[in-house]
Image (tube, rainbow, N blue to C red):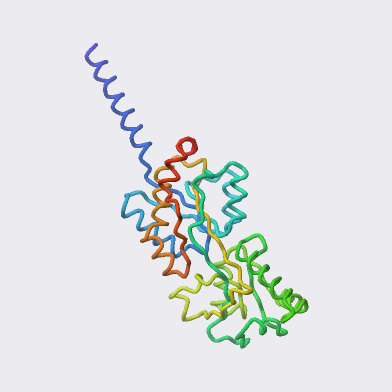
Amino acid sequence: MIKRLVLLASMAVLVFSSSAVSADEPEELVVFTAASLTGAFSEIAEMYEDETGIKVVSNFDGSQALRTQIEHGAYADVFASANNKQMNALKDLGLMNNSSVSIFTRNKLSLIIPKDNPAEISNLRDIVKPGVKIVIGTKDVPVGDYALQIIDKLGNDSAYGPEYKEKVLANIISQETNVNYVVTKIALGEADVGFAYVSDVTLELSSRVSQIEITDEYNIIAEYPIGITTESRYAAEALDFINLVKSEEGRAVLERYGFSPVLDSVAASEVSGTTEEPMAAA
């Protein structure tokens, strides 16, 4: 009887030990990602899975929607935003491991038009013509905020004038909560022109959508921060993912999708080495 009890106890210890080990080895990593990064981060996620065997569960949406989800308790290991505003909001609430946050890529906007261009849009002046249907993001989504800043810049320039801004705003027929929705409406011909990121016109969309450049004088350079949430149970694996994004391979993917990757002067691994205490709390 005693031998049987000892055997059962030993088995229980083995089961417990096995469970403890498996709990420390994640089967998946949850990454909340700005919608404009969908193509690039889908590829990088596949690279990470191939290298580590850990599945990446991606949540692509407007940065403001992702921030709200995290604020309301949604679990994420990594958050990649299309602007600093949404990231800073989470940092201020103590929901990000602040020392892990850094800018990893940049982007800028362009006008996008359907390939057949029924409204005959060829430059920034054409979008004020009566009847032109414009679609932008909401003021809360980064791409919408950037678009409004560009429109303000143009309106404050004597070459365009305040009436320009009024006429552009009057032509807006829709404000979307996600940049992918802006691009989709243009691709389907539901609007004549939209404000979207340069990176949004992918090879797959190039047969249906064309771009018109917005010069740097009026454009906004969008900075994309990435970091680890304080709720992450797998900070080490999350840091590995971020390091992959910033690696030569990751930057090559971002460049292929039209982004301008940023090479940090301090590697993410060095940052983790100087922030042992916050990382342990993550």
Above or below: residue 208 compared with residue 52: below
Above or below: residue 250 compared with residue 173: above
Above or below: residue 167 compared with residue 197: below
Q: How many marks?
A: 0
Residue 223 point in image, percent of width and height: 55, 61
- Residue extending farthest left: 3
Residue 143 is left or right of residue 130, and the answer is left
Asked whether residue 1 is in view, the answer is: no
Residue 12 point in image, percent of width and height: 31, 24
Residue shown at the point (41%, 62%) measured from the top left: 251
Residue shown at the point (31%, 32%) measured from the top left: 18
- Residue extending farthest front: 265
- Residue 154 or residue 75, whichever sits in front: 154
Residue shown at the point (54%, 67%) measured from the top left: 180
Residue 255 point in image, percent of width and height: 43, 68
Residue 112 point in image, percent of width and height: 57, 77
Residue 124 is left or right of residue 81, and the answer is right
- Residue 120 or residue 99, whichever sits in front: 99
- Residue 35 or residue 220, whichever sits in front: 220
Asked whether residue 169 is in view, the answer is: yes
Using the rendered view, name the quadrant where residue 168 is placed.
bottom right
Q: Image quadrant for the N terminus?
A: top left
Using the rendered view, name the quadrant where residue 125 is placed.
bottom right
